[in-house]
Amino acid sequence: MELIQKTKLTGDHNTDKLQGPVFPQAFARSLSRHFRLPVHYRSAGVDGGDINDIRRFCMNVLKEEVASDSSNTYLNHSCKYVSGKPDLVVVLFGINDLKHLLAESVLHPFRRSGDGGIIGRFRNGIDSLLNEIHAHAPNAIVLFPAMPVQSYHKNSVVNIFPLGMVWDTVLSFFMRQKKDLANKRVNCIHCDLTTAEIANWYKMNNNEEDLFSGTNFNGIRNSALLSADGVHPNSRMYKLWAESVCQNFYDCVAPKIEEAKKHE
């Protein structure tokens, strides 16, 4: 799905634009509040897609933005929802990558083969995406948010012992590859997410003592932060996650912006 909206300085959305996914809306609203500037954004995604699907099917969005910038106007562009060369590209990925790669290598998921196994293929996919983004928008900052994979909901399948422990171990090792590559690249930032912060989200949403009782199905449903598959975030978590990512990004770049202003 593709969308574009502009935020006002208050962080509110204009009402004459398309509606779309929760994460980009919440992220843009929070970004606008932090930097006190209007934010123009566009979102593209692939349902169930991994890093390679993102590169194959979503790069056209970036290319259209860059093309509109070079033409000095987007009013006559074939897509009316373009705004220009991006300053920031946020890429959400990881869960589907692990799912797809494990399905291909069920018996030996971490065995190193000619292509490095699933870890090597994952890292190659990240490298290819970064290379392509910076080939078209070399000055854009690419942001890799850490995925909110820990679940503190007692009814989540990943909290069944020892499945939860195994899941956290495998997934954290897999996700560290994003951070490792981001730290080695120019104009690429990995936004960490602590287990304490995720636990606090659940605490805020689970304030009833009997919330997890076997008969309190409405409480469980209304407080859940994961989708029906027990792994992916739902809209409530996407909003909390987006606001957290924006805060971390602002904390990272704000001091650099202030320092740059001193030398203007």
Image: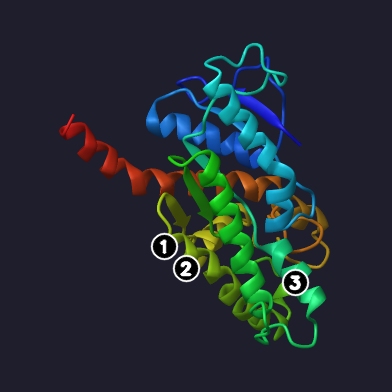
Could you tell me which residue is drawn at 75 percent across and 72 percent down? Answer: 101
Q: Residues within 10 Å of mark 3 (few under 14, many from 20)?
A: some
Discs 1, 3 touching: Cβ within 8 Å: no
| Front residue of this view, candidates 153 and 92 | 92
Residue 77 to residue 1: above or below: above
Q: Residue at x 67, y 82 (%)?
A: 114
Indicate the position of residue 251 as horizontal and vertical percent values: 35, 47
Residue contact at pointers 1 and 2, CB within 8 angstroms: yes
Instruction: Give the residue at x 68% y 14%.
Output: 16
How far is disc 1 from disc 2 in space, using C-alphas? Answer: 5 Å
Task: From the viewer's side, name the closer residue of 171 and 215.
Answer: 171
Residue 202 screen position, x and y as percent: 60, 58
Q: Earlier in the sequence, mark 1 or mark 3?
A: 3
Residue 156 seen by the camera: no
Residue at x 81% of width, y 57% of height: 228
- Residue behind mark 3: 101
Compared with 55, 125 (above or below) is: below
Q: Position of residue 127 (x, y in %)?
A: 56, 60
Q: Amino acid at mark 2?
A: Asp
Residue identifier under label 2:
180
For residue 158, which quarter of the picture? Answer: bottom right
Residue 230, label in figure: none
Q: How many marks?
A: 3
Name the kind of residue labelled 3 in the image.
Leu
- Mark linked to residue 183: 1
Q: Amino acid at mark 1?
A: Asn
Residue 78 visible in this rendered orientation of the protein? yes
| Disc with the residue nearer the chain's start (2 vs 3) | 3
* Labelled pair 2, 3 in contact (Cβ < 8 Å): no
